[in-house]
Image (cartoon, rainbow, N blue to C red):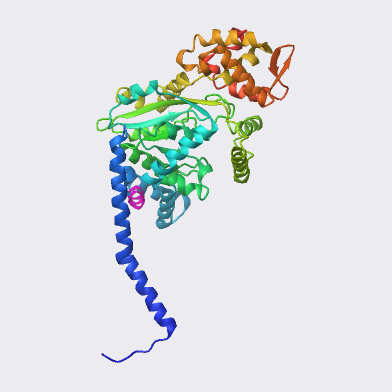
Amino acid sequence: MTGTVTLPVWLFALILAFAGVTFASHFLFPSVRWFFRRRAERIVARLNQRLERPIQPFKLARRYDLIQRLIYDPEVTEAVLAHARENGLREDVAFEDARRYAREIVPAFSASAYFGFAIRAARWLSNELYRVDVDESGAGPLAQVDRDATVVFVMNHRSNMDYVLVTYLAAQRSALSYAVGEWARVWPLSALIRAMGAYFIRRRSRTALYRKVLEKYVQMATRGGVAQAIFPEGGLSLDGGLKTPKVGLIKYLAEGANLEARDLVFVPVALNYERVLEDRILIDADRRGERKFRASVVSAIFNALALLWRRATGRFRRFGSTAVRIGAPLSLRENPGLAATPEALGREIMSRIAEAVPVLPVPLVAHLLLCRGPMRREALIEAVETTGQGLGERLVLPRGTAEAAVDHALERLGARGLLSVADGLHGPTEEAEPILRFYANSVRHLLPDCAGAA
């Protein structure tokens, strides 16, 4: 027992490595996980004291546990068996498909990532790119919503900046769980978005098994009281106007709600811009009649770097104004009939979004120029004053005057080369009409048609 054992250096090093791994896995890693878990719990406790709607335990559950709970749901199991029969697969192979879908959908929320990084980044980016106008008058009815209700923010989809703006808007209310399209499944962006609580949705190649896994996750989150944010239109508006809602997610939400235990409240959020970053890309896709965007990650990174360089050299100008308005909340507990008719529910949601859309100077002036043709500055001011009388709080005027609004809009459009001036008449250039129409479409439903505006 007291003899000396001689070992080769390589074997001694191997033994030390195995000992180190064993120590780390049995003692160090559990301690580190416990430390960070306790720290995260303290952070969440402090956050819940100031948030209007506390972060629900479901959102804080371990991702692995949520995946296991999801794939062993009885309805998912039935869908796995049907998937195996329909595709001639072994059941274990079909089950692994369900697991892969669950891993793709289920987020890994981090309160530190969301409130420590995402909120600050959203606030900084929003104010760097735009003059942000957020009307909190709609927050009053929202504050009256039952604190235990599941709140779903439903928004029109104009730009990928929508995610940033609504995160900024809801910073003091709750942590939102977004339904995000396939565009965000790019590393390392996907890891960051998943840590912020978003869940990915495939727009194409969706099997019945995938739809069932997605449906059950959305319903689990809804019953768990998770505040969510969805775009009922299903994608970016290609022509700038509001679209007919797609009721897939709305149906999952309504069917998953247990209204006796917890109300489900849809909160309409309407966004509008004087400059959509992707406007030419969207207009081109609309012209071609297909939702394929001629833009790449490389070009997006290049444009972002160009903006940063202009910002660093003092030559950057913000892209005008953007405005966000909160519409009248829709409680399913108070409207139980809509829960059984997703199409009617979708129409009511879009109607409330449409009613709340803010009217900014650039879309309003674009509408007037397209309807009436070239106009003098004085005539535009008179038209804005006349039109604005019926818009009430939806009309957003710089410095509160029609004159300032017209000057602002003419300056913004002129800087992009979209207007020409001849004999005091301001009119669109030859290539400007598609762009002006894109912005005019965002407020078309709130304004007199061209026959009435003439």
Q: Main secondary structure of the magenta part?
A: helix
Residue 53: quadrant of the picture: top left
Highlighted range, magenta:
62-71
State the residue at coordinates (46%, 53%). 88
Query: Left or right: 376 with respect to 400?
Result: right
Residue reaching furthest front?
314
| Figure check: 302 above or below 275 | below
In the rendering, at what x and y percent does residue 83 appear? 43, 49
Residue in front for this viewpoint, 147 or 5: 5
Residue 252 visible in the current orientation: no
In the rendering, at what x and y percent does residue 451 appear? 61, 8
| Figure check: 291 above or below 326 | below
Residue 310 visible in the current orientation: yes
State the residue at coordinates (53%, 48%). 186
In the rendering, at what x and y percent does residue 389 appear? 50, 8
In the rendering, at what x and y percent does residue 4 appear? 32, 91
- Residue 246 is one of the magenta-drawn residues: no
* Rendered-image quadrant of the N terminus: bottom left
